[in-house]
């Protein structure tokens, strides 16, 4: 994704025979299994972010395994094509398939894939896709190429709350490899953010790091806790206490 004076440019969908096969199999498998009654309930639970087919997660993942059976491992171009084409379909389960596909194959992708994830994070955004992309895809890309931390720095102060949330959460799985100074800095930058999802992400990111270094998180909040919303502090201290 390039950024111009008019804003980000949507990534191009590359030609991919593998993606052609995946999408043909995927729509053939998912659509007949749709459950309209369940779809209405799922859509309501997700605040109408997108229509649903009504596939429960275990059934959806079982169908996904049949879709991928016997197919070769994808290239980065294949991952791009599958993800973008799934995102162009309205029903949320296709987005979930794309997220699972990227989680499984993110090691096939270079740092050049980050603009694609930016598009996914900011298009039809909600926590159900953003959080998995942040922790399992964006986080993996940044871990593989630390130069991408500069982009995380930019996302951490973006006007788009979902990019901010992604920056806050991308180190969730880093454990002892967490850049604590960067994590604490991101939290401080957004300590006064008005949106629930950013305040929640601050607390979640700190709580997860507290599993590795509870003393550092406790000390950080002892110094800076008054600057944060009570929600963020409660979330951060859930597992370690005050």
Image (cartoon, rainbow, N blue to C red):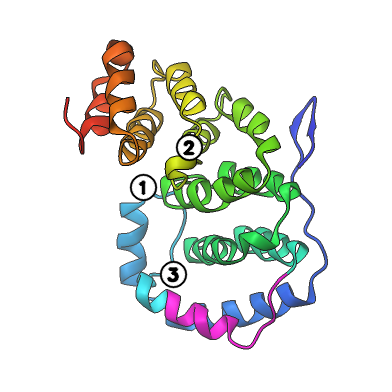
Quadrant for the C terminus in the image: top left
Q: Which residues are magenta?
A: 61-74
Quadrant for the N terminus in the image: top right
The residue at 55%/27% (across/down) is: 156
Q: What residue is pinned by disc 2? A: 178
Horizontal arrangement in the rendering, residue 60 relative to residue 109 (left or right) = left
Badge 2 element:
loop
Q: Nearer the viewer, residue 139 or 144?
A: 144
Q: Is the residue marked by circle 3 packed among few (<14), some (14-19), or many (20+) residues within 10 Å?
A: many
Mark 3 or mark 1: which comes first in sequence? Answer: 1
Is residue 150 shown above or below 47?
A: above
In magenta stretch: residue 174: no
- Residue 107, given in percent of the width and then of the height, sits at 64, 60
Horizontal arrangement in the rendering, residue 217 relative to residue 171 (left or right) = left
The residue at 79%/71% (across/down) is: 16
Mark 1 or mark 2: which comes first in sequence? Answer: 1
Q: In the figure, residue 175 lies in which quadrant?
A: top left
* CA distance separating discs 3 and 2: 38 Å
Q: What residue is pinned by disc 1? A: 47
- Residue 203, given in percent of the width and then of the height, sits at 32, 31
Tell me, yes or no, whether the two marked residues, 3 and 1, touch with CB atoms within 8 Å: no
- Residue 115, given in percent of the width and then of the height, sits at 70, 44
Q: In the figure, residue 209 lies in which quadrant?
A: top left
Q: Is the residue marked by circle 1 packed among few (<14), some (14-19), or many (20+) residues within 10 Å?
A: few
Badge 1 element:
loop
Mark yes or no: residue 34 visible: no
């Amino acid at each position: 994704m390039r950024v111009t004076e008019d804003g980000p440019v949507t990534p191009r969908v590359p030609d991919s025979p593998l993606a052609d096969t995946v999408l043909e199999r995927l729509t053939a498998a998912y659509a007949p299994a749709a459950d309209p009654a369940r779809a209405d309930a799922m859509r309501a639970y997700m605040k109408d972010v997108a229509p649903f087919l009504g596939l429960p997660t275990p059934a959806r993942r079982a169908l996904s395994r049949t879709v991928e059976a016997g197919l070769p491992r994808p290239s980065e171009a294949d991952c791009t094509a599958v993800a973008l084409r799934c995102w162009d379909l309205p029903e949320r389960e296709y987005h979930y398939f794309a997220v699972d596909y990227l989680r499984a194959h993110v090691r096939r992708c270079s740092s050049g894939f980050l603009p694609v994830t930016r598009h996914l994070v900011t298009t039809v955004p909600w926590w159900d896709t953003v959080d998995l992309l942040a922790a399992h895809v964006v986080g993996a890309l940044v871990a593989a190429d630390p130069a991408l931390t500069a982009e995380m720095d930019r996302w951490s102060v973006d006007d788009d709350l979902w990019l901010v949330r992604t920056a806050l959460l991308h180190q969730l799985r880093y454990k002892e490899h967490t850049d604590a100074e960067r994590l604490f800095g991101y939290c401080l930058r957004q300590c006064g953010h008005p949106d629930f999802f950013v305040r929640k992400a601050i607390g979640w990111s700190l709580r997860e790091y507290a599993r590795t270094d509870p003393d550092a998180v406790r000390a950080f909040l002892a110094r800076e806790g008054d600057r944060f919303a009570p929600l963020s502090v409660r979330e951060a201290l859930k597992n370690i206490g005050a």
